[in-house]
Each structure stands twice: as structure tokens, then as C-alpha cells.
Amino acid sequence: MTGIAVVGAGYWGPNLIRNFANNPKCDALWVCDRDPARLENIGRRFPAATLSENFGSIIESDADAVVIATPVGTHYALAKSTLEAGKHVFVEKPLAASTKEAEELVELADKKDLRLMVGHTFEYSPPVRKVSSLIDSGEMGDIFFVSSMRVNLGLFQNDISVIWDLAPHDFSILFSWIKDKPVSVSATGKGFVQAGIPDVAFISTTFESGAVAHIEVSWLAPSKLRRTTVVGSKKMLVYDDTEVVEKVKIYDRGVDFPDPKTFGEWQLSYRTGDILVPRLDQFEPLALETSEFLDSIEEGRAPLTDGRSGLQVVRALEAAQKSVEAGGAPVAL
Amino acid sequence: MTGIAVVGAGYWGPNLIRNFANNPKCDALWVCDRDPARLENIGRRFPAATLSENFGSIIESDADAVVIATPVGTHYALAKSTLEAGKHVFVEKPLAASTKEAEELVELADKKDLRLMVGHTFEYSPPVRKVSSLIDSGEMGDIFFVSSMRVNLGLFQNDISVIWDLAPHDFSILFSWIKDKPVSVSATGKGFVQAGIPDVAFISTTFESGAVAHIEVSWLAPSKLRRTTVVGSKKMLVYDDTEVVEKVKIYDRGVDFPDPKTFGEWQLSYRTGDILVPRLDQFEPLALETSEFLDSIEEGRAPLTDGRSGLQVVRALEAAQKSVEAGGAPVAL
Amino acid sequence: MTGIAVVGAGYWGPNLIRNFANNPKCDALWVCDRDPARLENIGRRFPAATLSENFGSIIESDADAVVIATPVGTHYALAKSTLEAGKHVFVEKPLAASTKEAEELVELADKKDLRLMVGHTFEYSPPVRKVSSLIDSGEMGDIFFVSSMRVNLGLFQNDISVIWDLAPHDFSILFSWIKDKPVSVSATGKGFVQAGIPDVAFISTTFESGAVAHIEVSWLAPSKLRRTTVVGSKKMLVYDDTEVVEKVKIYDRGVDFPDPKTFGEWQLSYRTGDILVPRLDQFEPLALETSEFLDSIEEGRAPLTDGRSGLQVVRALEAAQKSVEAGGAPVAL
Amino acid sequence: MTGIAVVGAGYWGPNLIRNFANNPKCDALWVCDRDPARLENIGRRFPAATLSENFGSIIESDADAVVIATPVGTHYALAKSTLEAGKHVFVEKPLAASTKEAEELVELADKKDLRLMVGHTFEYSPPVRKVSSLIDSGEMGDIFFVSSMRVNLGLFQNDISVIWDLAPHDFSILFSWIKDKPVSVSATGKGFVQAGIPDVAFISTTFESGAVAHIEVSWLAPSKLRRTTVVGSKKMLVYDDTEVVEKVKIYDRGVDFPDPKTFGEWQLSYRTGDILVPRLDQFEPLALETSEFLDSIEEGRAPLTDGRSGLQVVRALEAAQKSVEAGGAPVAL
């Protein structure tokens, strides 16, 4: 049994608190926030939780693990203190504000043999897992490219750009699907509403295998789009998270390019077969995510979305930001 | 009255022939193609046309103007011969295979005081013109960015990449909307089916005003998408050419960022109003395009899509291709 | 200030309880249910509520008004007792299980000068109100017909048919839009899963003005549809409640039929203009509905969805059921 | 080899002419129309056709079969003359203007042992045939009900109502799917633009098996809908003819109603599986339809859409019309 302390009870924290509170493997719950009004609210909903306005008291508590759901700029310092106190740590995405910080956390967790997990929630969602299994089974063939859009009107941040706000979702999903080394990132972005804080960005990533990925993120869009296309050598699919039922569509489509036998012969054949909308499991991704953290602690093993995957995402975000600042020049990973 | 000779009666040529044949301002029609079977077919449909397998005979004919609908690689030589023979010329998009060629054609037409027009057909289509008028009227406010997708399965070309095949549409539309100097282009692309001939590309363009545009083109896609989003400071719109009725949707949406009065104050307000689907005129873009060519000849004035606009598009295509070859590095325009 | 007692804390009751609890005009809250587990759950969420397993205690309480959210078969008896005890009453839709019962309740409320309100929630929803105001303003012209679909897979009931379960929504919406006398109802329906309990029905209603309405309701459908078309002499509109943003679409379309001047002349002109998706207010219909009940009590006036509108809906439901039983023969209202 | 004469070269006739002209089994072609301008136009496109303004000359010609594509009111007389002259006959839908007329034609063709075929074109379309094969194979289970919408703005007719104009499509599709005896039809309809000529109708049909079908047809609708839902005991499907690619969607969905073992036990289970969009063949329905007519003549057998199926549709249309006139009362078939 594991005692969990959640730090940060703002926008996202209450969802984590609810899931840990409902998980029978979590036998004690602390909640820490600087805002007494928030704590009072949490106290009403979760009377068994121990409340605190002071992070120091969490470090000194009997909690086995700390869950950090605070602004990105504070992730590194809070996670470091937690690990140094000998406690496991779960950090909301992105893991840290820089590659350097993320690397340090990974090293520290390794040295202390503690669990370091990142809240890449989409990797626990039914459609993303379904796509993973389709790719892993070979049904899609070689993955040629992935093109993803995550745009809507708002919610603007003033401490981080749209790249650090929305692209962690796409990069974590992408790296869970394409288990290949990313080579370079080039990005164009711009802050139209707040100068200097990009609110729209177009990010290309190349992989060692030759695969290519593109991510469009924006806080400025007429309608909400969450659409990812995956093109493989055998099949293609669309994952649209705004659809209620038809979130994943698998297209039995492709192009065959037979070797020309004679000079001048050139002929492609287009394959067009059925479209399948597979039934998806129905569960809350966060329930699986919090379970994975508790299990990884109990079993003494790395969680699915461990520090290394968090570091890989931070590295890509940092490269995208540098590329934007360099006018779109590619940045090696 | 103008005599028109159409060179090339393959995939697209017959549409041009039909529109010139139906236009009362065109009083004589020549059609030239190397393939006798195609000519015979044209002859049956347009008994009044003079047919020829030989481009030389077109140059020597009484035709006032020549319309070139042949593969891109032949545009320059055929258009140059036409202009040198003192005839006006209409060239299918893209104008030429390189900036150098396009520049020469523009100069030659200027020197000879002949009309040089490019077949940027979309600029004559009702939805593109509606968007133009919305932007020109100031209703959209300042244009922040444009994001465009033009993807489907096929039709692969083996002489040109998807950039030269599909992006001319997007660049010509884009430059007709944003009448501002493009500064640089960066692009990521890859040939998955035919090595070395990109079948997918992601292209970013920046403008002097700070506006940004992104174009995704692909011959490898599970479903056909023709979707362009325009985000302005006052309104946003979506132009979806696959829609039968709702091709243009205007969103009265935006973000207001009031100057903070006190330090630490930071507040955005999101504006969400009506959505309008304007009624569009119903006409064939090609009818307007061929009319414009005939009118520009009769009136001795530059056509809407003149050599300069053709050159600007070729310059952007060439820059995109160079950027792909340079691994995504931005290329100045 | 009004004291409210909610009877029935099953599927829908908790929503009513929450809205009364949040309304400052409600100063005391009782909740009654036969199931102690449900009551305990309510007690945790609403500690200020007085709980009871016994309807008698509600009747004897100081509550000014009773809200009945129990199965249809019990509406009449509970509402009657409430009125006889001199308390105002709010009954979930449909008001009662028969016209006779509904008439008695209306008469009793009148005699006692007490408020009788029915939970026709959709009449308080932003899209339905928007359509009402469009019709009332004359913008739609004369209403020709309304066609409505309300279908999905499940949730089957075993005490009432799909007509009594889903059609109250459509009839109450319909009668709020068309303030004209309904003349007759004919319906075809069938129970495929449970013999004798229709799970699909097609219901036509005619009005004195000549307007026609059609309602399709079903528990057996491959996907959820909530789509209503309103055709007026000047405009047409679609109200689709499954849409997140574009719930109401107004089409400036129609047909003009000029009087033929000469024999044999016959010509219609089709009008096709813009489509408008109006911005809708954002509020919970139930908040407005519960407010209306409290206000009507305070102000001593009939609520918007009063007993008469509840009776009109029950009369239509009963007629539809009779028509189904008569093999589709029309039943006069 | 068969000689074919097409009578009527208005809106639809030219499509039939083109398909017979392209079919190698048709070795001689006559075209008859009262309008010389139409004939001239046909002559240019089909130089091999023999043209005539006079039906009598067709009857006296060597044509083996006559194809009638004239207004409904003339079908009976023209088809009767054709059969009496010993020629096979193909009649556009609906077969005739009344059951009586249709019955006579069927009898006459039988007596003379001539082919009588009706132009129920949709029965030859890939999506309708795909649905047929799904039903015939038992994959859908027992067919519970079919609900169909065929609505758009225009094209109004002034000689027949929307029932006789659009519902022949739905009835012919329906009877090709449900090969069961229809029992009765009830319908509500109304003429809003032209008094007395219904421009909208809601038609219910019941079958001996207990299956139910509903058809909504309208010339007054804000947008074009061609949507048919088929609910079977094992699967459900949607056939949407306005979709370009996803015309047929098969839902592995249903409800299981286990026999309750104990009193009071009542539990349904909802089944939700994959959705499949099957690849459809790509061909022009009319090519298959005209082929079927030629084959049926050559092979001396009844065509797929023979006089009996034409009669069945006319009977249903007549019943629907009578029910509308009787205020919705069911009419036995």
C-alpha cells in the first residue's frame, strides 16, 4: 500500500486527487496547495485527505510518493526535493522546463533507485493505445509519416508558449507510436496575441528510419481540432479525438509501386479497401495512469511513461522552441 | 475577336478547349497535340477547331494567342517560342520549372508588350474570391496566419514532386489573399513511394508583415482534404473545398488582449459570436479564367494572374524544394 | 423564500436537487426516496437537506412545494396528494399516465390556486428558445412543417413505451413553437425487443393552421440522432442537439410560386441565400427551469410550462399510443 | 443482338440513350421525341441513331424493344401499344399512374410473353446491392425496421406529388431488401407551395413479418438528405447516398433481451462492436440496368426489376396517396 501526496490543486490536480482517492492501492492521501480556499474545497470532497499549505510538510510526511501538478517552472525544484527526500515522484507534463533539468531528474531518480513518472495522459487513452497496438502488430506496415493538429480558441498561457502547452501531448503520443530515434526538429511559430509567446506553431520532426512527423498546435483557431493521420506502407488511419464514437478509422488504402521491368514503364496501383472503426475500450485514461504509478512503485519497475520518455519530450520541445527562434532552421536532437 | 490555339489535349487541355470554344470572344480555335487519337477525339467534339500534331504550325498560324497545357518541363520552351513569334501566351500552372525560366518569360513578355497569363484557376473560383473580398474589406482584420491542407490518395506524378504538383494551388491562393512580401520558406518533405520525389511536404512561409502560412500537401492520405483556415485579428474563417454547400464559414471569434493596467494583471477575453456561411456565386472558374485572358488581350492590360504572379509562385516552389533538400533550413525569397 | 421537497433521487432527481440547492430563492430543502442508500449519498453532497424515506412526512413538512421525479405511473397520486395538502407541485415529464389524470391535476391546481408545473426541460434550453424567438419574430414566415428525430441505442424502459419516454420532449418543444391547435395524431410503432412495448414509433400530427409535424423516436438506432427541421414560408432551420457548437442553422432558403398569368405558365423560383449559425447563450436549462418554478410561486402566476402544457403533451402521447394500437388510424385531439 | 428505341429525350432519356449506345449487345438505336431541337442534339452526339418525332414510326420500326422515358401520365398508353406491337418494353419509374394500369401491363406482357421492365435504377447501384447482400446473407439478422429520408429543396413537379416523384426510389429499394408481403400503408402529406400537390409526405408501411418501414420525402428541405437506416436483430446499418466514400456503414450493435428467470428480473444488454465501411464496387447503375434489360431479352427471362416489382411499387404509391387523402388512415395493400 502506498501513501500519495498531491502538490497543486488548481486546474488539473483535483482530477489526480480523485483518481488516487478512488484507487484501493493508495491508502493515504496528502494534498498540498498554497491557496487555503482550494484546500478547503478539496477537504470537503475528500474528507480523509491530510491538507497542507506547505510543501515542506509534505517532504517530512510519511507519503511514499509525491505527485506534482504545479506550473512547469516549478517542476524541477519540487521533483528534485522529493527525490532527495527518498520519495517516488510523478510530474505532470512536461517533465521540466529544459533538457538540462529533465536530465538531472532522470539521473537523480536512477541514482536513488526511485520511480520517476511523467503525466503523459494520452498514452493511457483507449484510442492512442488502439493505434499503438495496430502499429506494433505490423498491420499498418512501415510508418511513413504522422500529421497532427491540436488547435482551438484559447486557453492562452502567459508563462509558456503553445509549444510547451499543447505539443507535449503530440510528442508523447508520437514517441509512443514510433519507437525510433528522432533526428531533428524544425519549427515555425509566432506570437500574435502576446508578442514573444508563440500562440501558433508548425513543427516537423524527422526520424532515423526516414519517417517524418508534423504537429500543428494553436490557441488561435476557429474550431477545435484534434486530428492525427498516420500513413503506413500497408494501411492508413485517422485518430480524431473530437469524435464521440468514431475516434479511430483504419483505411485499407495504399499505393503499390512495382519495379518497372522495362525502361519507360511506370505504373502505380492504388489500393482502396474497407474502412474499419474499431470498438474502443471505455475507461478514464487517468485511472489507468494513476494505477500504473502505484503499480510501478509496488513492483519496483519503471512506469510506462518514465523519466526517459519525459526527457525525450522535453528535448523535442526545446528543439522546437530553438528552431522557432532561429527562423525555422532545423535543430538536431 | 481573338484566335486561340491550345497546345496539349491531355488531362486538362480539353477543359480549356471547351471554355474557349464556348466563349463568343474567341472566333477561331486551333488545337495541337502529338497524339493523333486525342486530336481525333477533340475533332469530334469541336468540329470547328483546326487540328495539328505539330507545334511549328501553331507558331505559323494566324492564332493571336497560344494556351500551353503540356507537362511543366516544356512550359518554358513553348512559351518562349510563342512570345518570340509575337503571340500572347497562357501557361498552365506552374508557369515554369525554375525561377530563372519564369523570370525570362516575364521579361520577354514585357519587352514584346504581349500578355503572359498563368492558369492559377483557383483564383477565379467563387469561394477563393469570396475570401479575398472578406480580407480586402478589412472584415477579417489583420491576417495573422493561414494553414492549408491539400491531401488525397494519388495521383502520383513521376516527373515532379507533390510540391510542384499541388502547392501551386495553395501558393497562388495565398499570394492573392496576402498581398505582402513573402520573406522565407522552410519545408520538410519526403518521397516514400518513389525515392527522391517527395509525395508529402510541410511548407512554412513567413511574410514581411509578420504573417505566417503553412501548407501541407500529400499524395498519400487516407481521405481527400482541401481545408484552409485563415485567422485574422477580427475574424477567422475556414474554406473547405470538399464541402458541397458550406465551402466558406466565417467565425466571429477572436481574442482580445487588453493592456494590463497594473503589474501582475493579465487577462484575455475570448470573443465568440455567430458563424456565417455566405451564399457563393455559382460559375465555373475556368469560364471566368478564359474570359479574363481574352479580355486582357482585347483591352491591352495585364491579366489578373499575370506572369509576375506566376513567377512569385515558382519562386516559392523552388525555395520549398531547396529547403527540403537542405533538411528543412529556411530559404530566403 | 420557498422551501422545496424533492421526491425521487434516482436518475434525474439529483439534478433537480442540485439546482434547487444552488438557487438562493430556495431556503429549505427536503429529499425523499424509499432507498436509504440513495438518501445517504444525497446527504453527503447536500448536508443541509432534510432526508426522509416516507412521502407522508413530506406532506406534513413545512415545504411550500413538492417536486416529483418518480416513475410516470406514480405522478398522478403523488401530485394529487401534494395539491390536496395545499402545496405547489412540480412534476417531471410526462405530467401523468393519461389524459384523465392530467386533467384532474390541472383542475385541482386551479381550484386550490396552486402552481402546477411540468418538467419540460428542453423548453428552457438555449437552442429551443432561440428557435422560438425566430418563429415568434416572424423571421421564419408561416411554419409549414416540423420533422424531428430522437433516436439512439437504448435506454429501454419496461414500464412505458418509447412514445411516453422520448416523445414528450418533441411534443413539448413542438407545442412551444407552434402555438396552434393540434387536430389529430396518427402513429405507427412496434415493439421489437419487448413485444407490446413499442421501441420505435413514427408519429404525425396535424394542426388547425395546416401545419404538419412528424416525430420519429426509437431506442433501436445505430447512432444517436437529435435532429429537428423546421420549414417556414420564409426560412428553414435545422436544430441538431448532438452538435457541440452548430446546434442551430438558419437557412435563407425557400420556394416562390408566382401566380401564373397565363394558362400553361408554370414556374417556381428557388431562393438560396446565406446560412447563419447564431451564437447561443450558455446556461444549464435546469437552472432556468427551477428558477421559473420558484419565481412562479413567489409571483403567484402560472409558470411557462404549466399544467395545461403538460396536459396537452399527455393528450398527444395518449393519441399516438391509441393510433399505434389502431394500426395507424388517425386519432382526433 | 437487340435493336432498342428510346422514347423521350428530355431530362433522363439521354442517360438511357448513352448507355444503350455504349452497350455492344445493342446493335441498332432509335430515338423518338416530339421536340425537333432535342432530336437534333441527340443526333449530334449519337450519329448512328435513327431519329423520329413520331411514336407510330417506332412501333412500325424493326426495333425489338422500346424504352419509355416520358411523363408518368403517358406510360400506360405507350407501353400498351408497344406490347401490342409485339415488342419488349422498358418503362421509367413509376411503371404507371395507377394500380389498374400497372396490372394491365403486367397481364399483357405475360400473355404476349414479352419482357416488361421498370427503371428502378437504385436497385442496380453498388450501395443498395451491398445492403441487399448483407440482408440476404443473414448478417443483419431479422429486419426490424427501415427508416428513410429523401429530401431536398426542389425540384417541384406540377403533374405529380412528391410521393409519386421521390418515393418510387424508396419503395423499390425497400421491396428489394424486404422480400416480404407489405400489409398496409399510412401516410400524412401536404402541399404547402402548390395546394393539393403534396410537397412533403411521411409514409409508414407494415409487413406481414412485423417489419415496419418509414419514408420521408420532401421537395421542401434546407439541405439534401438521402439517408436510410436499417435495423436488424443482429446488426444495424446506415446507407447515406450523399456521402462520397462512406455510403454504407455497418454497425455491430444490438440489444439482447434474455428471458427473465425470476419474477422481477429484467435486464437488457446492449452490444456495441466495430463499425465497418465496406469498399463498394464502382460502376454506373444505369450501365448495369440497361445490360439487364438486354440480357433478359436475349435469355428470354424476367429481368430483375420486372413488371411485378413495378406493380408492387405503384400499389404502394397509390395506397400512400389514398391515405394522405383520408387524413392518414391506413390503406390495406
Image (cartoon, coloured by chain):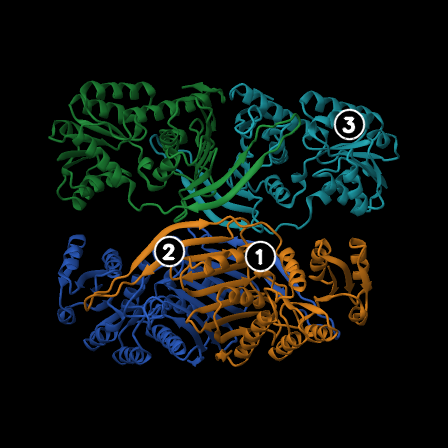
Chain colours: A green, B cyan, C blue, D orange
Q: Chain of mark 1?
A: D
User: Where A244 falls versus A118 (above or below)?
Assistant: below
Q: Which residue is mark 3?
A: B78
Which residue occupies 66% across, 27% down? A264
Q: Quadrant of residue B225?
A: top right
Relative horizontal placement of residue D149, taking residue A314 as reference (left or right): right
Is residue B261 among the parts visible in the rendering?
A: no
Q: Position of residue A76 (x, y in %)?
A: 26, 23
Q: Which mark is residue D253?
A: 2
Relative horizontal placement of residue C155, taking residue D216 as reference (left or right): left
Q: Position of residue A255 (x, y in %)?
A: 54, 35
Residue type, mark 1 in image = Ser
Q: Residue furthest front?
A: D299
Q: Chain of mark 3?
A: B
Query: Of tags 1 and 2, which is closer to the observer?
Result: 1
Q: Chain of mark 2?
A: D
Query: Of tags 3 and 1, which is closer to the observer?
Result: 1
Quadrant assignment for the C terminus of chain B: top right
Q: Which residue is mark 1?
A: D125
